Each structure stands twice: as structure tokens, then as C-alpha cells.
Amino acid sequence: MHSIFARSSKGRTAVFGTVCGGSNPPRATRLIATLYTLAQLVANNQFQMFAGTATRPLAELIAQSYGCTLGEVNISRFSDGEIHPRFNQSIRGNDVFLIQSTNPPAENLMELLLMMDAARRSSARSLTVVMPYFGYARQDRKDKPRVAIGSKLVANMLTTAGASRVVTMDLHAGQIQGFFDIPVDNLEASGVFIPYLQSLELPNLVVASPDMGGVTRARMYAKHLKADLVLFDKFRERANQVASMQIIGDVKGKNVVIVDDIVDTAGTLCMAADYIMQQGAASVRAATTHAILSGSAYDRVRSSQLAELIVTDTLPLRQSEAKIRVLSIAPLFAKALYNIYNFESVSSLFLT
């Protein structure tokens, strides 16, 4: 009695069963040959990475950091704008990683879903969706009558389309992970923000949370930066519009860093920066993961008292701005994908 094992080039070991000798050796021989063929299929299993059109520059950096090249996928359109993706190479039996942020317009999400469906129908072995920015995450609960829970709907669509796993970064609300029945890895941009902030060597540093929901994130930054923590108490009359604001804590003579997950219109952020400077702060910066920067956001940042707006490349910038510094999270995603593919720990990438 013996077991058949196969080891791939990635170090994986698969056990294909136990073969017994006996009175029918030819049958056992055929079984061994079949199992050996299966073992060869597993050993030849490949990792393939593809990108949608929304964040292709980031996808190229992730592939470069990983040490591979992006696969060929053709995303064409009918004359009425209907999206039609097609993989230009075989992905049968392979582990496929699709990279696409789902920022507006909604076509970016639809493009990702169609790519997922094409991959599943092409017999991909597994399908990992890499969404650096998880669109519709701000609609994570029913906070008013007769509203949608958009993030739950997106989770359902991704699962139905065939996702085996989702990798994203700095979800607007951590509980969105519970909307899925598949593994979700919520990476944190603190791994690139904190080393950069430490390199500035700012004295009298204070970390500010823009609201109560961001206190946990801000406290973690304060811990690693050995800084004090302050927070804002603000009231919104409607989305993207703050009616009143006050700060809890002392910022006089301090260098303040506001940490948040999203900067959209930048209205609230710039108002907070101006308010901090009015309270006697020495300087104010902001570190926000996802730079949506819609509407007049660039003009607001330019005219604000922000010394610097530090963002990542989960979303491409629409224009350049001297006050905006972009830090790439491509190496972090590349390491996460490597660990996932090789069954290694992802939690080792988090600062605790």
C-alpha cells in the first residue's frame, strides 16, 4: 500500500490517494497512471494575472513587483457601449487573479463581473478578485428608510459571478467582510503611510481621526508613530456636506496628521485642516488611502492649508497637484498575492 504524491514548482504537495496491490495488478497500474496524470496537471498549474481598464497602471506595477507579466485580455465594446471581454490565452485549470477597482462609473464594476464570468466559463481553477478600491462601500447599512445597502449587493454579485476570494484595501467599514461567504483579505495602507510619516521626522506629532468611526485606525497610527490622538466631532446635514465641526484634544503647536480611508470632494478634509490651523497647529497633513477627488476637490486641496495630501494609487489621479503625494501599494498587494498563492500567512503583512 502506498500514496501517490505530486509536488508543483511552487512547493505545493497534493495527495491523490492510496493504491493497493492485490490480485488485479493491471487495474492498479491503470489507477496509478491516472493519478500520475492528475498529479502532472496540478504540477503544471499556473498563476495568471489580468487587469481591467480602471486601474491598469496599478496592475502593471503589481505584476512587476510580483515578477510576472499581465495576461492578455481584450476588452472591446459594441457600438452602443456594451462591454465585451475576451481572454486571449488559455486559463483552463489555472489560478486567475483579476485586478480592478470598482470606482464610478458603474461600468468598472460591470466590466469586472463580465471578466469574472468569462474566466469561470473558461474553466479557471480559482478566481481571486483584487479590488484595491471597493466601490459602494459607503453604503454599508440602512441608516435611513428606503435606501439600498450597496456594499452587500456588490458582495452578492461578486460571489454569484464566481469569486473564490476577494483582496481589497481599507474598506470603509470592516464589517463588509461579513457580507461575503468567501475569504476576504482587507489590506491596510498603514504599511506604506507609517514608514513615510516616520521619515519626515516631525516633532510634536499628533494623529487626528476625522470622525468616531475612524478612531481605531487613528489609534493604530498614533501607536506606531508614538504620537497623541485627537478626534473630530462633526455633523452632516447630507452626504459630502458638514454642518458643524469641533475638535476633541489639543493641537496647539503640534504637527497634525489626519488619517482616513477616502477623500472624495475634499470639502470636509479641507475644512478640518483649516480649523486645525485656526486652533494654533504648526502644520497639518492628511493621509487617505483612496483618492476619489471628485468635483472641485483638486481646487480645494490647492487652496487649503494642507501642507500635503498623501494618498495611494488604488485609484488613478485625474490630474497632477503639487500638494498631493502618491505612495504605491503595489509591492504590498504583490506580497499578499504571493502569500495567498503559496498558502502563506497574509496577516504577517498587517501592522498591529
Image (cartoon, rainbow, N blue to C red):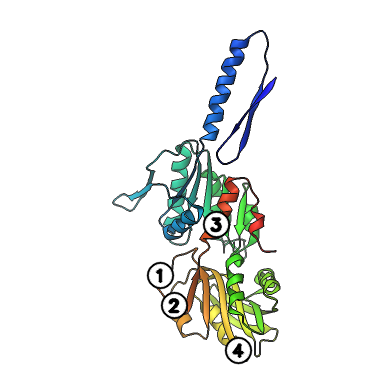
Percent from the top left, x then y, of residue 277?
Answer: 59, 89
Between the residue at mark 4 and the residue at mark 3, the CA separation in whole angstroms equals 35 Å
Q: Which residue shows up at 53% across the image and 63% down it?
A: 329
Q: Which residue shows up at 42% across the image and 60% down it?
A: 57
Q: Quadrant of residue 6?
A: top right
* Sequence-first tag of 2 and 4: 4
Q: Say if mark 4 contacts mark 3, CB within 8 Å.
A: no
Q: Nearer the viewer, mark 2 or mark 3?
A: 3
| Apparent side of residue 203 relative to residue 286 in the rendered image (left or right) | right
| Apparent side of residue 243 relative to residue 220 in the rendered image (left or right) | left
Asked if residue 84 shows in the view, the reply is no
Name the residue carrying label 1. 318
Between the residue at mark 2 and the residue at mark 3, the CA separation in whole angstroms equals 27 Å
> Observer-nearest residue: 24 or 322?
24
Q: Say if mark 3 contacts mark 1, CB within 8 Å.
A: no
Name the residue carrying label 2. 298
- The secondary element bearing badge 1 is classed as loop
* Sequence-first tag of 3 and 1: 1
Percent from the top left, x then y, of residue 176?
Answer: 62, 57
Q: Amino acid at mark 4?
A: Ala
* Sequence-first tag of 1 and 2: 2
Name the residue carrying label 3. 333
Q: Say if mark 1 contacts mark 2, CB within 8 Å.
A: yes
Q: Which residue shows up at 45% across the image and 39% down it?
A: 91
> Observer-nearest residue: 122 or 188?
188
* Sequence-first tag of 2 and 3: 2
Q: Is 32 above or below relative to 314?
A: above
Percent from the top left, x then y, of residue 42?
Answer: 55, 33
